[in-house]
Image (cartoon, rainbow, N blue to C red):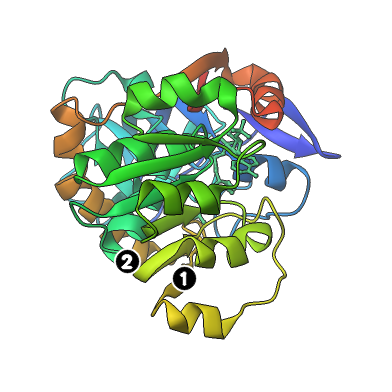
Amino acid sequence: MRAIVIEDKQLRWAEVPDPEPGEGEVVVDVTAAAVNRADLLQRQGHYPPPPGAPVYPGLECSGVISAVGPGVGGHHVGERVCALLAGGGYAERVAVPVGQLLPVPVGLSLVEATALPEVACTVWSNVVAHDRLRSGETFLVHGGGSGIGTFAVQLGKALGATVLVTARAAKHERLRALGADVTIDYQEQDFVRVVHDVTGGRGADVVLDIIGAKYLARNIEALAPNGRISVIGFQGGTRTELDLGALMAKRGSVSSTSLRARPPAEKARIVSGVRDQVWPLVAAGVVKPVIHATFPLSEAAEAQRVLESSDHLGKLVLLR
Ligand SMILES: NC(=O)c1ccc[n+]([C@@H]2O[C@H](COP(=O)([O-])OP(=O)(O)OC[C@H]3O[C@@H](n4cnc5c(N)ncnc54)[C@H](OP(=O)(O)O)[C@@H]3O)[C@@H](O)[C@H]2O)c1
């Protein structure tokens, strides 16, 4: 088969060995794969695949099962699926543990479905399973225009939350169309002040943060009593001081997780939660994949260049 390989921090479309399905795995013939910010870090050598994962980039794909490994029940050759991957989506075929397979949501094409597994699993596991965002609460999403952000806005609205997002002004109109109640231009406005203005001084109940160190103190300032902050990205660095007094005064909590590093059994539990709680919202059209552009798989380098520019809104998808 062919796959995108990383050589000297560059992407190259190359002939590589076909994957074989291991115990509890299937092989998926890839129709489409999506690009994630983590893929840029992997290309730059900062985010190696976990042990045992395919070495090619790509954290999600959709396609058709072409082989079934030992010990697999309930799946068959020819089945259309999408999948959460530890790597290997930028390829013509990929071996996937069955716990990471999802059905193609009702009403979506295979290409649309590929834009969902990584964002749905990341956002659901942090915001729903961990932070327990509830109807009537205020949800602050940093980086509303990202793949993660465009999904989080829609899920937050579907759960009945008031959704505030930070993003560059050029993205605000489209974010309001997705359901954002308040858009904050982080280049011109102080998000802490806007959050307090909008909530009558109470603050945000749940914060989904992709900036990390640079925003930690201000996220705590913006937090409501009993608020929860989930840090899932470090675009603003990893090291900073934490004022425990400020956090305690809010009776707040800060957590941080990486989906890719979780063991397969944990990923399977998350995938199962997403299938039960998020897929019905997708089938009902309440939560939709947001695809900015598509590229041939062999032109993954160009797709990564667009992602790096941050001029996109939503996901970039690679087509085989
Ligand atoms: N921990 C996990 O399990 C996990 C899983 C998936 C993703 N992530 C993380 O989640 C983040 C988003 O991933 P993605 O693939 O969806 O990224 P993406 O589509 O490339 O989006 C990144 C976004 O960051 C925004 N941004 C940059 N500086 C900002 C700031 N100071 N304030 C607010 N927004 C800012 C940019 O929007 P503007 O144009 O508005 O600046 C851009 O849209 C990444 O940091 C990624 O590593 C974590």
Q: Along the horizontal axis of the image, is 141 left or right of 135?
A: right
Task: Return the residue nearer the eye: 113 or 6.
Answer: 113
Residue 198: x and y, percent? 38, 46
Q: CA distance from mark 1 to mark 2?
A: 9 Å
Task: Return the residue nearer the eye: 312 or 54.
Answer: 312
Residue 244: x and y, percent? 55, 84
Q: SS at mark 2?
A: helix
Does residue 128 appear in the picture of this structure? yes
Say whether mark 1 is within 8 Å of ligand 1.
Answer: no
Rendering quarter of residue 12: top right
Q: Identify the residue shown where x is 58% and y is 61%.
A: 218
Crowding around mark 1 (Cα neighbors within 10 Å: few <14, some 14 to 19, many 20+) is: few
Crowding around mark 2 (Cα neighbors within 10 Å: few <14, some 14 to 19, many 20+) is: few
Q: SS at mark 1?
A: strand
- The residue under label 1 is 255
Task: Report the amino acid beneath label 1.
Answer: Ser
Task: Return the residue nearer the eye: 92 or 38.
Answer: 38
Contact (Cβ within 8 Å) of mark 1 with mark 2: yes
Residue 272: x and y, percent? 22, 54
Does residue 24 appear in the picture of this structure? no
Residue 130: x and y, percent? 32, 66
Q: Along the horizontal axis of the image, is 35 left or right of 81?
A: right
Q: Which of the two discs, 1 and 2, labels the residue nearer the N terminus?
A: 2
Q: Along the horizontal axis of the image, is 6 left or right of 261?
A: right
- The residue under label 2 is 130
Rendering quarter of residue 11: top right
